[in-house]
Image (cartoon, rainbow, N blue to C red):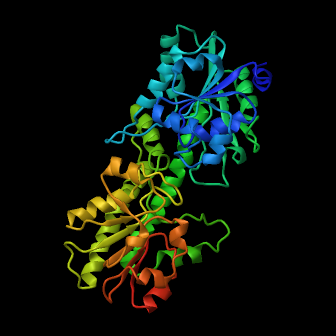
Amino acid sequence: MLVEDLLNHREKLALVGLGYVGMPIAVAFSKKVKVIGFDVNKEKVNLYKNGIDPTKEIGDKGIAACEVEFTAEANKLKEAKFIIVAVPTPVNADHTPDLSPVESASRLVGKNMEKGTIVVYESTVYPGVTEDICVPILEQESGLKCGVDFKVGYSPERINPADQVHRLETIVKVVSGMDEETLDMVAKVYELVVEAGVHRAESIKVAEAAKVIENSQRDINIAFMNELSIIFNKMGIDTQSVLKAAGTKWNFLKFYPGLVGGHCIGVDPYYLTHKAEQLGYHSQVILAGRRINDDMGKYVAENIVKSLIKADKTIRNSKVALLGFAFKENCQDTRNTKVIDIVDELREYGIDPIIVDDVADKEEAKKLYNVDIVPIEKLEQVDVVAVCVQHDIFKGMAREKIDQFFAGDKKILFDLKGMYNRKEYENAGYIYWRL
C-alpha cells in the first residue's frame, strides 16, 4: 500500500508550488515521509535551501530544521508516487479565471510522472477543472491513461496566512478521488498529518464546489455588512454599535465590514460565477456582493476627502497616511490588497498618500504597485491617519502616540476596522470615522 511505502521511505511525496499554501503542506508531511519540494522559482528554492522562509508562514528555524528536499529541477518529480499541486489560481483583469498556473503545473507534472502516480490538486478552481482541463493535459504530456496508469484527486487548501491557530493540522481536510480506491488512498495520506481528520467528498466536483462556496459565502456576508455600513453612515448611525446590539441574538452571524482582498475571498466567487455563465446562468447575489466589496476602497477614499473638507483643509496635496498595506492583518503579503484602491482613488484627488506598514513585504509592494512603504517611526505632520489593516502593532497604539502624527489641531482618524474607542477620540476633538 502507498501509505505504508511512504511511511517506510520506499516512496516519496512531492509538492509542486512552494508558496503560502504549498510550503506548510510540504513541511508537515516531511515530519512523516520523504518530501520533494518543487518550485519553478529558483531564487525562492535557494532561499529555502539556506533556511530562509520568504513567506514567514513556517519561519526560518522551521525551514532550516525540516527535511524537505527543495529543488527547481522538474525531473525530480519522477521519484514521487504522490504529487500535490498547490499553485495559485488568480483572476484576470476582467475577473475571468486565470488557469495558466494550474495548466502549466499540469504540463510540468505530466512530463515528469511515472506509472502508478496519484496527482492531487489543492488549487482553488471551479467544478470540472481537475477532470476536464487538468487530466487531459496530464495524459497528453505523459502519454499515460488516467484511471489506468495514474489517478487523480482533489483536496482544496484551507491555509489561512498568518493564522497560527487554524493550521493544516487543525482544520478538517476535504478530500476526493476519481474512484473509491483513489479516495481511500488520498484520505489515508492526508490523515498522516491532519490531526482534525478528513471529510471524504462524494466526488472531485463536489470538493471543488465546496471550496469556491466557502469563500463566496464569506464574501456575500461581508458585502452585506459593507452595504449596511454605507447606509448607516448616511443615517449618522455607528455600524459597530448596531452590530454589537444585533449580535446579542443567539443566531446572528458575526460578520463585520471591511476591505476584502487576498487570494481567496476576493477571487473564488469569480470562479463560480464564470462557470455558471458558461452554463447560461448569470449570478445575481454573488456578483452583487462582489461589486460592493470591490468598490469599498473608492468609498473610503471619498470619505477621506469629505472629512478634509469638513475640517476646512485643502484637498490637493493634503498629507494622508495609510497604516497597513498588506491584504490582511499580521501578514506580509500585499498581493491583491484592496488598500491600493484607496491609494489610486486618493491620487485622483491630487493626494499622494504616505503608506506605512512595518509588516508588509516592501519589495513586493514596490514591484507590484510601484509604491514606497515608510517605517512608522518616520511618520509625522499629516492631516489624516487611516488605519486600514488590523496589524497587532497598530492595535496597541495609544492615542498619545497617534496624536504625534498630526500637524495641526484638527485631527482626522479613519479607523476602518473599529480598533479604537470612538468616544475617546471624539472627546479628544478628533474627526473619527469607521466602517
Q: How many marks?
A: 0
* Picture residue at 68% right of the left edge, 21% below the top: 179
Quadrant assignment, res 357 = bottom left
Q: Say which of 149 and 47 sits in front.
A: 47
Rendering coords of residue 24 (x, y %): 62, 41
Q: Say which of 404 and 13 sits in front.
A: 404
Residue 388 versus residue 427 in the image, above or below: above
Left or right: 57 as drawn, with respect to 102: right
Rendering coords of residue 181 (x, y %): 73, 20
Q: Say which of 86 and 358 sits in front.
A: 358
* Whether residue 200 is visible: no
Left or right: 416 as drawn, with respect to 178: left
Q: Residue furthest top?
A: 143
* Picture residue at 35% right of the left edge, 61% below the top: 297
Quadrant assignment, res 82 = top right
Quarter holding the N terminus is top right
Rendering coords of residue 354 (x, y %): 32, 67
Rendering coords of residue 265 (x, y %): 49, 50
Left or right: 339 as drawn, with respect to 249: left
* Whether residue 70 is visible: yes
Q: Say which of 236 and 48 sits in front.
A: 48
Residue 105 versus residue 396 in the image, above or below: above
Q: Residue furthest front?
A: 50
* Picture residue at 49% right of the left edge, 87% below the top: 423
Quadrant assignment, res 314 = bottom left
Residue 142 versus residue 248 in the image, above or below: above
Quarter holding the C terminus is bottom left
Residue 262 versus residue 255 in the image, above or below: above
